[in-house]
Image (tube, rainbow, N blue to C red):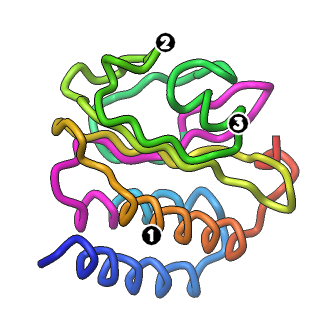
Amino acid sequence: MTKTEAYQKAGEEIVRRLQQEDHLIANLGNVSAILKEYMEDINWVGFYLFTQNQLILGPFQGRAACTRIGIGKGVCGTSFQEGVTKIVPDVEKFPGHIACDSRSKSEIVIPMIFEGKKIGVLDIDSPIYHRFDATDQAFLEELVEWIVQSCKINENEKG
């Protein structure tokens, strides 16, 4: 199965799930599991949510992770602060990289923005250098947009 085909299948399952449920945390848990199942060569996938002026670990699949990330710190904090997707081909070369899992070699982080407010990030790590590309970015950005539009975002989840 090609990467595009895998994303199409994952997307179909995610859309089905999101149409059945509108609770953010429940949906992020399922999205993490579905992405972990369909994406090849990843070792961690999950969400960090903006709370109390920092990113707090949310639903994820993979080894135990850092629970709090400062805004502007590491790939997640930088992506959140700048409000743009970050693709990092070699995490060792990213200034200030936070190594939660020493197996991770590359990373993609997509900011979650709801009604103009940043609410968190989707973070995916791979044990393979240069794992992520424009195909990943396009699908994952569309997925994040779908998530934030499909879920009820309460005041705590807005930060």
Measured Cα–Cα span from mark 2 to mark 3: 15 Å
Label 2 element class: loop
Label 3 element class: helix
Measured Cα–Cα span from mark 3 to mark 1: 20 Å
How packed mark 3 is, by other alpha carbons closer than 10 Å (few <14, some 14-19, many 20 or more), is few
Question: What segment is highlighted magenta in the picture?
Answer: 34-57
Q: Is residue 48 left or right of residue 105?
A: right
How packed mark 2 is, by other alpha carbons closer than 10 Å (few <14, some 14-19, many 20 or more), is few
Label 1 element class: helix
What residue is shown with label 2? 96
Task: Check residue 82 in the rendering and tell me which mark sits there, or answer none.
Answer: 3
**Name of the residue lying farthest toward the top:** 96
Q: Residue at x 64, y 61 (%)?
A: 24
Q: Residue at x 52, y 69 (%)?
A: 143
Residue type, numbered disc 1: Phe
What residue is shown with label 1? 139
Q: Is residue 65 left or right of residue 82?
A: left
Vertical position of residue 81 compared to residue 98: above or below: below
Residue type, numbered disc 2: Gly
Residue type, numbered disc 3: Glu
Measured Cα–Cα span from mark 2 to mark 1: 27 Å
Q: Is residue 37 left or right of residue 33?
A: left
Among the 4 quarters of the image, the one containing residue 100: top left
**Name of the residue lying farthest toward the left:** 1
